[in-house]
Amino acid sequence: MRLELTKRADYAIRAVLALARAAEGERLSVRQVAADQRIPVRFLPRVMSDLVRAGLIEGATGRTGGYRLGFRASDVSLLDIVEAVEGDSRRRTCVLRGGQCLSADVCDVHVVFVAAQEALLGQLAAASVGELIAKD
């Protein structure tokens, strides 16, 4: 069993953490975030756009533009970030049968996997950006 983030979610988390560590009110360019976090600069604008659309960060164009947090770091979770770029994180595919999970005819391991999924999502929801950067 593999438990890993997509590149998109990985980049989004690292970008938000970089913005959270910036001085209050400071805007960072895509190039600054990409260089600081070792993220390919060609991919980062799409991730940042998703984060802006979700309201997690604010973006401004122009010479003094860039990105900054659109929230207090303690008010957003890892789950918020992942879902901003990936959508709803809940599994919809049956673990054993593949295809759509049918609640009327669940497989033998349905209850166990749903509980594991909820535990994982709960952990991601409980981990705030503020707590993560406070550990630095």
Image (cartoon, grey):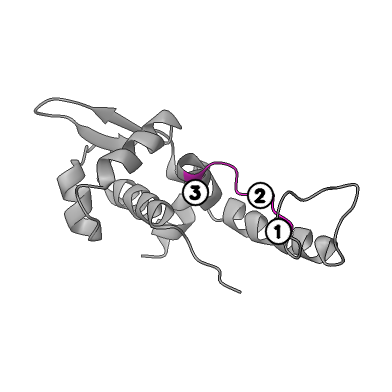
User: x, y (%) of residue 109?
Assistant: 82, 67
User: x, y (%) of residue 119?
Assistant: 70, 61
Q: Residue at the spot x=20%, y=41% of the render?
A: 28
Q: In which quarter of the image is residue 107?
A: bottom right
Q: Residue at the spot x=39%, y=51% of the render?
A: 8
Q: In the image, which residues are magenta?
A: 86-94
- Residue located beneath label 3 in the image: 82
Callout 3: few (<14), some (14-19), or many (20+) C-alpha neighbours within 10 Å? many
User: x, y (%) of residue 29?
Assistant: 18, 41
State which tag comes first along the sequence, 1 or 2.
Answer: 2
Comparing 90 with 129, the one in front is 90
CA gap between label 1 and label 2 equals: 15 Å
Would you place residue 116 above or below residue 99 in this image?
below
- Residue located beneath label 2 in the image: 90
Q: Residue at the spot x=82%, y=61% of the render?
A: 110
Comparing 120 with 7, the one in front is 7
CA gap between label 3 and label 1 equals: 24 Å
- Can residue 25 be seen in the rendering of this structure? no
